[in-house]
Image (cartoon, grey):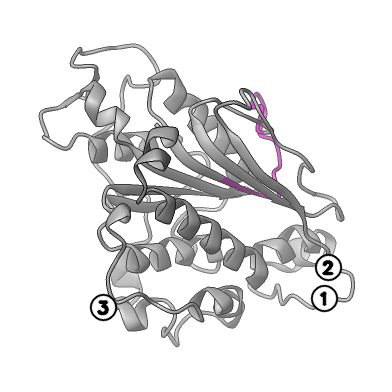
Amino acid sequence: MPPAVDGKETNEPPLAGFPLTTNADLPILSNFPSYRHPAASVCGNTKLNPQVREALRLVCDKPIEEQTPASARGLIVIGFLGGFVEARESKHPEVWFSYFLRERYPSALEVAAFSNRNSRQAMATVLQALDLDHDGLLAADEKSHARIIIYGHSWGASEAVAFAQDLNQIGIPVLLTIQIDIVRKPGQHPTVVPPNVHAAINLFQSEGLLHGRSEITAEDPDRTRIIGNFHMKYDGQHIDCRNYPFFPRTFNKPHHEIENDARVWNQVATVIEGQVSSLATPSAQTAAH
């Protein structure tokens, strides 16, 4: 039985039918033998394909604090992959970026990557993580203390805002949404950020068969800060995309160049760090909720 809202059981969407199992959509760690020690799991993992390693190069160059910020306690990060990609497909930087964040913020409640078709499983993961007293009920105070970050690429970027909208329906705040080269999924409106989101950022490119939306806006500008819409350009830039099949990397290369761009993941990591650090001040916590 899924957690109920405000102490009351409900059969109304989007809560109905969520399983209480978590992480079933994550890559199976036994498939990655070097995922044993934080120093080797991502930045020091020699088994990573060269393209993913390059995509995370600037992220891995960041200095690591000796102590995790206290404001990271209770953090929940949900990532959505693009297209028909499953979260077990380790050739995508989005998957390994979630592992990086696990190491960066070990006190986080949950960091998980999902295919964009598995939003129900992602929701079940979030609801269970927020149910701190494990009573199967999601009370108002448990919802109000949520510190949720959602990121995604392509269809995953579309799903990121749709997921935030689902959370908005049940009164759960979102600290930050990060959208990379938004491709709209049918029936979704990924460029309008719902009012439960404290801050949002959009990174896009405008070339190729598939290209991102150039602007996101806040449904309620008084409640949501748009950090920016950042146009990434690849004329004269060499981004290695050999971790993807021939057709997409040949005929849709810019859409995957932004996915493999070390500058993009460095920006994403920097924005996350800024939002997590901002939680250290009482005024920022009040604004986020």
Q: Is residue 177 above or below residue 101?
A: above
How far apart marks 2 and 1 lie (CA) works out to 5 Å
Which circle's residue, 2 or 3, is located before the other in the chain? 3
Q: Which residues are magenta?
A: 178-190
- In this rendering, the label closer to the viewer, 2 or 3: 2
Indicate the secondary structure of the residue bearing disc 3. Answer: loop
SS for tag 1? Answer: loop
Q: Which residue is mark 3?
A: 36
Relative image position of residue 140 (x, y in whole percent): 25, 22
- Residue under pointer 2: 234
SS majority, magenta = loop
Dot 2, crowdedness within 10 Å: few (<14), some or many (≥20)?
Answer: some
Contact check, label 2 and label 1, Cβ < 8 Å: yes
Residue drawn where x is 33% and y is 69% of the image: 103
Mark number displayed over residue 237: 1
The answer to whether 227 is drawn above or below residue 55 in the figure is: above
Q: Is residue 149 above or below residue 87?
A: above
